[in-house]
Amino acid sequence: MADRHNRDIDREFAPLPEPLPVPVADAHAHIEIVTNDSPDSESVRRILDQAESVGVTRVVQVGYSAEQSQWCATLADLYPGRVLAAVALHPNEAPVVSDLQADLAIIEKLAQHPRVRAIGETGLDYFRTPPELRSVQQDSFKWHIELAKKTNKALVIHDRDSHDDVLSILLEVGAPEKTVFHCFSGDVEMAKKCIDRGYVLSFAGTMTFKNAPELREALKLVPHSQLLVETDSPFLAPTPHRGMQNTPAMIPTIVRAMAHERNEDLAELCNALSINTERVFGSFA
């Protein structure tokens, strides 16, 4: 993932959107990639302050490696009331780390941290991982599922080109009570299966892309109680800012697009998203 990360930190920042009428949370961000800086840096504070200025008052900072998951936990400690953390090995990391068991031990220890409220992002990614390494990914995914259940924390899933196997493993192992599909990328049929099973679907800037009509149709089906919004910053900046640096401050653009597609009042949708974020991850205080 490192090469991709290095490419993204040099992108131009999009202008700040109009503030939301009701504060919401960004359910999935990678601020350390935006800033390429330490958790206590001024650049990190600036990103959080810009988000708060447009009504994005809380952020879930999500892990993808052992080292970066520690960064997430540290950031959550530094910003009570504003940041919570998730920790995990990304599915693309699990097959290539030098000592998988040592890294998993670090994740297991971090999972005990009181401001770590989710295990993620874990899951499967068949886009970047060749078939001969997928069994390692699957075993890592199952391990993370069990950790989420053992610690009674939410599970945050990365699912790319692997819908059927992700759903199958969740049934095989048993999904945690709070299971979130980060940056949901499925179609209507997959959305129906997830809704029926009680999973939470988190939508990102991808739902604003012209080539995502099926994603917008799926969005319309999701009950308020199973809906989240995220940036996945610095990736996936929403239209009209595709190709620019994405930050938690872009949440208003995504939420307005969601309200339009669902034909809902913006303030009511914001309120539902805010309530649901704290139902899944707990209080940010």
Image (spheres, grey):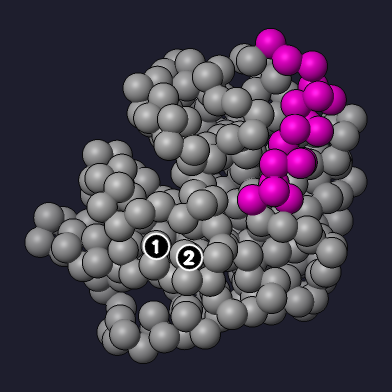
Residue for badge 1: 145
In the rendered image, residue 36, in percent from the top left (x then y), is placed at 62, 69
In percent of width and height, residue 254 lies at 66, 31
**At 64% from the left edge and 38% from the top edge, which residue is drawn?**
229
Residue 108 in view of the camera? yes
Name the kind of residue labelled 1 in the image.
Ile
Q: Residue at x 78, y 53 (%)?
A: 58
| SS category of the residue bearing label 2 | helix
Local packing at callout 2 (Cα closer than 10 Å; few below 14, some 14-19, many 20+) is many
Res 60 → quadrant: bottom right
The reply to whether the magenta stretch includes residue 89 is no
Q: Are marks 2 and 1 in contact (CB under 8 Å)?
A: yes
Q: Residue furthest left?
A: 132
Q: Nearer the viewer, residue 87 or 117?
A: 117
x%, y% of residue 47?
77, 57
Q: Read off the magenta span.
A: 263-280
Residue 148: mark: 2
- Give yes or no for residue 264 being in the magenta stretch: yes
Q: Is residue 267 above or below residue 284?
A: above
Q: Inspect this view and state whether residue 237 appears.
A: no
Residue 1, by quadrant, is bottom left
Observer-nearest of 219 and 65: 219
Find residue 49 and report its image quarter. Answer: bottom right
Helix, strand or loop at disc 1? helix
User: Within 10 Å of the Cα at label 1, are there few (<14), some (14-19), or many (20+) other Cα atoms?
Assistant: many
